[in-house]
Image: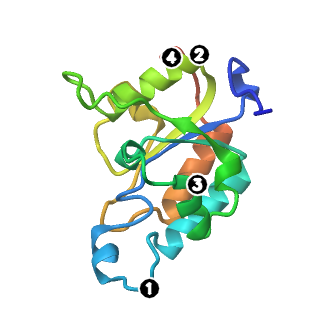
Amino acid sequence: MMKSILNDGPAATPVLFLDIDGVMNTSAFALANHSGLIFRTESVISLNRILTESGCRVVISSSWRREPRINLGAIFETQGVAKFRACLAGITPDLSNEECCNRGDEIEAWLSKERFTGRLAILDDDPIMGPFDLWHCRTDESKGLTTEVANRVIAMLVYGPVYREGALI
């Protein structure tokens, strides 16, 4: 049975909303790489640290979630994120066909559906997070997830502000 992450306030399992392009890889890395690796080594090491040190669950917010043929659990584990399937809590809904929706709106829809209360972080290279800027740990798309960004994510997931229906606790 999956551990509940709902309505537990500060004691809830923290949630990491994870983008892939610009976080786990970069366009320059993808073009230059011929070894079969999809993700940058530093990004994999940093994500493993985040998962271990924060104990968070992961919600995929990347556009990769829209591709039904992609097995994200297998990809992450093949690339070296050993605990990924055990940490996966779901994917954000696809609101790309809705008028005026961005990634922040999709995250808000997931939080509302799950009635989530707790600590969260958003790891993304997209600058537009709307009301979630406080929880946004933005990566530089040319560098991806670095040790410095991972440190901010861990601090946010362990000590950061608690989310409840769009408000801070």
Q: Residue furthest right?
A: 1
Q: Residues within 10 Å of mark 2 (few under 14, many from 20)?
A: some
Q: CA distance from mark 2 to mark 4?
A: 5 Å
Secondary structure at numbered mark 4 = helix
Query: In the picture shown, does residue 157 fall above or below 100?
Result: below
Q: In the rendered structure, which amino acid carries the disc numbered 3?
A: Gly
Which comes sooner in the sequence, label 3 or label 1? Answer: 1
Q: In the rendered structure, which amino acid carries the disc numbered 1?
A: Ser
Residue at the (42%, 46%) spot, across then down: 68
To which residue does mark 2 refer? Answer: 115
In the image, 45 versus 167, the foreground residue is 45
Q: Residues within 10 Å of mark 1 (few under 14, many from 20)?
A: few
To which residue does mark 4 refer? Answer: 112
Q: Residues within 10 Å of mark 4 (few under 14, many from 20)?
A: some
To which residue does mark 1 refer? Answer: 35
Question: Which mark's residue is nearer the viewer, 4 or 1?
Answer: 1
Q: Residues within 10 Å of mark 3 (few under 14, many from 20)?
A: some
Q: How is the image coloured?
A: rainbow
In the image, 168 versus 74, the foreground residue is 74
Q: Are marks 2 and 4 in contact (CB under 8 Å)?
A: yes
To which residue does mark 3 refer? Answer: 73
Q: In the rendered structure, which amino acid carries the disc numbered 2?
A: Arg
Is 90 left or right of 94, judged from the image as shown? right
Question: Which mark's residue is nearer the viewer, 3 or 4?
Answer: 3
Is 28 left or right of 85, judged from the image as shown? left
Q: Are marks 4 and 1 in contact (CB under 8 Å)?
A: no
Q: CA distance from mark 2 to mark 1?
A: 42 Å
